[in-house]
Image (cartoon, rainbow, N blue to C red):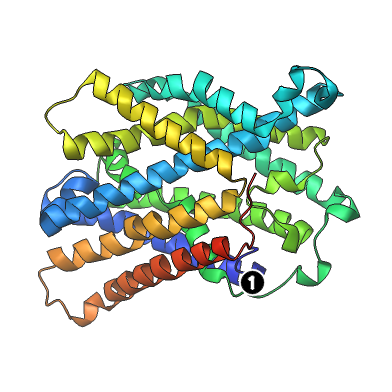
Amino acid sequence: MKEAGIGMGLVLLAFLTWIADWTINLLVHNAKLSGTHNYQDLAHFCFGRTGLIIISLSQFVFAFGGMCAYTVIIGDTIPFVFSWLIPGLKDMPVLYLLGNRHFMIFVLTLVVSFPLSLLRDISKLANASLFALLAMFIIVLAVIIEGPSVPEELRGSPELNWSLWNPEMFQGVAVIAFALVCHHNSFVIFADLEKPTLDRFAMITHLSTGVSMFFCAIMAIAGYITFTDKTQGNILNNFSPDNALINLARFCFGLNMFSTFPLEHYVAREVIENYFYPDNKSPFRSFLLTSTLVGISLAISLSTCDLGFVMEMTGGLSASVLAFILPAACFLKLSPLNLFSLSHIPHWLLLAFGVLTMVLSTSLSVSKLFEGGDAQTC
């Protein structure tokens, strides 16, 4: 909402939810046409080794960007909770480190996230999905309840409450795309259906994307009309550090990251191993890859507080490829009709939209970084 304005933000959220729903189903349709069973095989079937490189790189960037974003979130949440639970923490010898963002990111990554990332079987983290759903509900509820009672000095400019649009709307597209992209999981979900038909899968995607859009919308509206131009990438950072309900939300958010981080890391590591070493899996190599990936994501998260910037870059570089460009390109490749048939106009428009989003959102985000805009350093 901050990037696009509340009017255009809601339009983009509804439009991109519809696009996500359409392209998730389009991917499964493409898989049926090609006889493939996952995204990598589909891209490889359609475009050969070039397609495999593009999908592998996009999935890696998306997963690795998620690792960086989730590590930033740990630093945004857990230190606040400790500072609230232990009055006068910042003046205590040694213990003051529990409220230090950099120290907590470093320790919690090495002690919790890194060991969990070494797991070879991510099914052990399956129960975390239920907690993640509960945690997200608590976070949304906390923002809705506490937003109206925020002190005046924390509020943004009231003139911007109902702004129709802002020039940075393409950066907003990247953030929304980052939130909605689950295309790489669609094949697994389709295969797990008791009766895997396109109609049943379409019903599931309509429901899931619709629910996601609803919660994103009420969260965004409740946060933006309170903080407007002061809205941060992590909306919980806008609230007072001693707000009890918000600190519960921060705790839930941070705790959720301990299980979400390994899931993203698993994807990033698997992409590398499947591309370079498809027939030669080595536990020692996996350990080295995990150490390298976790170490780099840790270094990046220590250098920035700006969750929004991380999401913009990840969404611009990879989500646009996964959700817009490749689904349309694969369909155009597989369709038995003439490439420039009138029925292909929506797919060409989707392809152009994806390329435009990727180029503009990424260039604008990089430009903002070098101009010293909203991108924060810590």
Q: Residue 340 location in percent, x, y?
A: 17, 81
**Residue 329 seen:** yes
| Residue 70, percent from left and from top | 53, 38
* Horizontal relation, residue 346 to residue 63: left or right: left
Q: How many marks?
A: 1
**Of the pair 289 and 223, the residue shown nearer to us:** 289
Q: What residue is pinned by disc 1?
A: 7
Q: Residues within 10 Å of mark 1 (few under 14, many from 20)?
A: some
| Picture quadrant of residue 80 | top right
347 vs 64, left or right, is left
What x and y, as percent, mark residue 318? 37, 55
Image-based side of 374 in relation to 209, left or right? right
Q: Amino acid at mark 1?
A: Gly
In this rendering, the answer to whether 197 lies above or below 293 is: below
Q: Quadrant of the N terminus?
A: bottom right
Residue 253 seen by the camera? no
Front residue of this view, candidates 65 and 126: 65
Q: Is residue 185 above or below residue 233?
A: above
Q: In the displayed image of the protein, which residue is found farthest to the right?
A: 152
Q: Quadrant of residue 324?
A: bottom left
Answer left or right for 314 relative to 123.
right
In the foreground, 229 or 89 = 89
Residue 328 location, quadrant: bottom left
- At a point 23% along the width and 75% down the height, the residue shown is 344
Position of the C terminus, as image quadrant, is top right
- Residue drawn 11% across the image and 29% down it: 279
Q: Residue at x 31, y 74 (%)?
A: 346
The kind of secondary structure element at disc 1 is helix
Residue shown at 76% from the left, 23% from the top: 96
- Residue 266: where, in percent of width, then height? 35, 32
